Image (cartoon, rainbow, N blue to C red):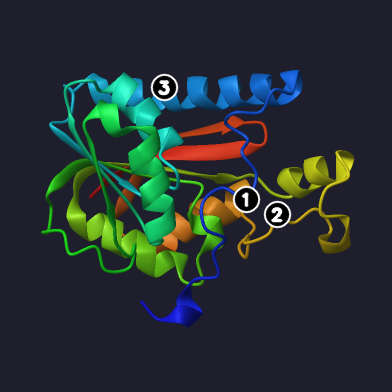
């Protein structure tokens, strides 16, 4: 992957998953409840034998996937070695294969993964269309995606007096998706059917299927 294609901050810039703030904890619960409802659609056709998470960060979302699909083989990758090291250290007992790779060139075989997950990644990428096409190549059926919902994300950051000089933009976010923009991105990548779209303040997420 060329350096110009990604302007990422290694891992989570802000650890929203482990926040003690009651409001943030409620928002995170809403996020995971919404994800679970989309995963329920997948489960109706039987649990996938393998799941791949693209851009796993420190592995917190990966550990949630493990709880949802306790029998699946789970592989998860991120671009940065230091982030993968943290994931391995934090979740070494969950039987998850963490490794370093680029979302643009995963080295996975075609049509090899029944469920691909990519949470809070596309907003960091210079070329999200290229990334989605790679996920489509390796996926055999379902793909789960989530991104911040804009401009609500930045507005909430400003309400808590964060990143005011950047109008509430979280460091590393170079794409800002409204619902229309998010669905347009998926359409531009091509070859997907949108099965379900959900909003969970301040996120949005979809379950799509490879056509």
**Quick one: label 2 or label 3, which is nearer the N terminus?**
3
User: Which of pointers 2 and 3 indicates the residue nearer the eye?
Assistant: 2
| Residue 125, label in figure | none
Element under label 3? helix
Residue 43 falls in image quadrant: top left
Q: Residues within 10 Å of mark 1 (few under 14, many from 20)?
A: few
Q: Give the residue pinned by disc 1.
A: 13
Q: Position of residue 72 (x, y in %)?
A: 17, 28
Instruction: Identify which residue is drawn at 80% across, 53% down.
Output: 168
Residue at numbered disc 2: 170
Q: Name the residue tied to disc 3.
A: 36
Q: Is residue 196 left or right of residue 182?
A: left
Residue located 17% across and 64% down the image: 107
Q: CA distance from mark 2 to mark 1?
A: 8 Å
Percent position of residue 21, x then y: 74, 23
Rendered location of residue 88, percent (x, y): 33, 41
Kindly state the secondary structure of the residue where label 1 is placed: loop
Q: Nearer the viewer, residue 3 or 136?
A: 3
Quadrant in which the N terminus is drawn:
bottom left
Vertical arrangement, residue 62 with respect to residue 24, above or below: below
| Front in this rendered view, residue 23 or 200 | 23
Residue 196 higher or lower than 81, as above or below: above
Q: Nearer the viewer, mark 2 or mark 1?
A: 1
Kindly indicate whether the residue at mark 1 contacts the one at mark 2 (C-beta within 8 angstroms).
Answer: yes
Q: Residue at x 87, y 55 (%)?
A: 164
Label 2 residue SS: loop
């Amino acid at each position: 992957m060329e350096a110009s294609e990604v302007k990422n901050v290694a891992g989570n810039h802000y650890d929203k998953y482990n926040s003690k703030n009651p409001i943030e904890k409620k928002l995170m619960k809403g996020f995971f409840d919404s994800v679970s409802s989309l995963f329920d659609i997948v489960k109706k056709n039987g649990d996938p034998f393998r799941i791949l998470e693209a851009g796993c960060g420190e592995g917190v979302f990966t550990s949630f996937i493990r709880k949802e699909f306790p029998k699946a083989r789970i592989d998860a990758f991120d671009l940065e070695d230091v982030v993968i090291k943290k994931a391995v250290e934090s979740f070494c007992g969950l039987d998850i294969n963490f490794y370093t790779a680029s979302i643009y060139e995963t080295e996975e075989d075609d049509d090899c993964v029944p469920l691909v997950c990519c949470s809070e990644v596309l907003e960091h990428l210079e070329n999200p269309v290229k990334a989605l096409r790679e996920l489509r190549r390796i996926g055999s059926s379902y793909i789960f995606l989530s991104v911040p919902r804009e401009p609500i994300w930045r507005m909430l950051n400003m309400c808590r007096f964060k990143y005011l000089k950047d109008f509430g933009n979280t460091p590393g976010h170079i794409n800002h998706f409204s619902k229309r923009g998010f669905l347009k991105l998926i359409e531009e990548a091509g070859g997907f059917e949108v099965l379900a779209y959900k909003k969970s303040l301040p996120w949005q997420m979809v379950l799509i299927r490879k056509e």
